[in-house]
Image (cartoon, rainbow, N blue to C red):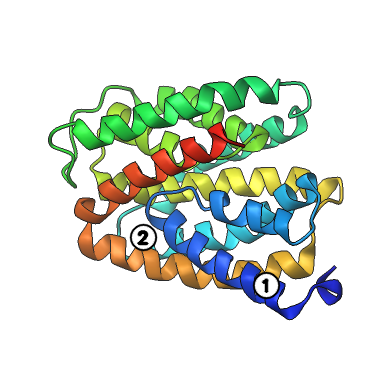
């Protein structure tokens, strides 16, 4: 497939992956950029989803490494949560044909708008940790695999849902929630990718090329997020949720 694409399409895919990695490392929603571009390049819907999972692995891994190197997420302590996210995504990808996609597309836009409004109007949305409402074990056993399952089934908005859960239930500040979101999102991406790769719907050359660009974009985005904190993450998250909701509504 790589050799069949015109150079301008390859460059478009590379640019889209870089920008998606940048946005995804801060507010999520990178698939909003890459999946439509993959479809435009001539990939079938299932190939676009599978290839997108491969390239997004690099972006989420890059962001996770950047946040972990600055102490914003402890990888070892989060491994059980990551495993739950991974397994949820594998199950979601395997059972994707059973759940009604039309229902998800109808429900998601208002949910994303609600998340955007929550982060826009909620006071004290900063980088300070708040009161924890759910025990870590319960959070990892229920919320994490459910969001991971959703990522395997459908995908758009996964980062926003993880962010909302970390802020409202675990009590993390915005920057810390973003850092933990990227690690769990990496795990769910890995689970979904494993399922797509098992059925042979991944374009490896395109996915790896885009992955390298996403890696670089995510590193730049994570650096800016750590420098600016909530004052950058909050408005970008609100904007991403609204744009994603509009995109899904008119899909």
**Which residue in the structure is indicated by mark 2?**
67
- Report helix, strand or loop for mark 2: helix
Of pointers 2 and 1, the one earlier in the residue sequence:
2
145 or 47, which lies in front? 47
User: Would you say 224 lies left or right of 40 here?
Assistant: left
Identify which residue is drawn at 64% across, 61% down: 55
**Residue plotted at (66% across, 43% down):** 191
When the figure is inspected, residue 63 is found, relative to residue 141, above or below; the finding is: below
Tell me the crowding category of disc 1: few under 14, some 14 to 19, or many 20 or more residues within 10 angstroms, Cα based: some
- Between 70 and 112, which is closer to the camera in this rendering? 112
Residue with the mark numbered 1: 209
What x and y, as percent, mark residue 88? 62, 32
Give residue 9's position: percent from left, percent from top: 70, 71
Asked whether residue 69 is in view, the answer is no
Q: CA distance from mark 2 to mark 1?
A: 23 Å
Mark 2 nearby-residue class (10 Å; few <14, some 14–19, many ≥20): many
């Amino acid at each position: 497939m790589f050799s069949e694409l015109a150079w301008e399409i390859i460059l478009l895919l590379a640019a889209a992956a870089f920008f998606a990695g940048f946005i995804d490392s801060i507010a999520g929603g990178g698939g909003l950029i890459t999946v439509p571009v993959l479809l435009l390049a001539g990939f079938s819907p299932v190939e676009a989803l599978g290839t997108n999972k491969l390239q997004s692995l690099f972006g989420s891994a890059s962001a996770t490494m950047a946040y972990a190197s600055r102490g914003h997420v402890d990888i070892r302590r989060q491994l059980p949560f990551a495993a739950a996210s991974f397994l949820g995504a594998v199950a979601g990808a395997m059972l994707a044909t059973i759940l009604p996609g039309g229902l998800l597309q109808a429900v998601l836009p208002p949910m994303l708008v609600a998340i955007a409004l929550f982060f826009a109007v909620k006071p004290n949305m900063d980088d300070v940790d708040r009161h924890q409402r759910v025990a870590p074990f319960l959070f990892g056993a229920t919320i994490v695999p459910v969001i991971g399952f959703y990522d395997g089934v459908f995908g758009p908005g996964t980062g926003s849902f993880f962010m909302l859960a970390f802020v409202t239930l675990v009590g993390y500040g915005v920057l810390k929630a973003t850092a933990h979101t990227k690690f769990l999102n990496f795990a769910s991406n890995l689970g979904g990718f494993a399922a797509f790769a098992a059925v042979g719907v991944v374009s490896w050359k395109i996915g790896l090329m885009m992955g390298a660009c996403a890696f670089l974009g995510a590193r730049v985005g994570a650096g800016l997020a750590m420098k600016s904190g909530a004052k950058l993450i909050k408005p970008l998250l609100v904007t991403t949720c609204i744009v994603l909701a509009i995109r899904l509504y008119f899909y």
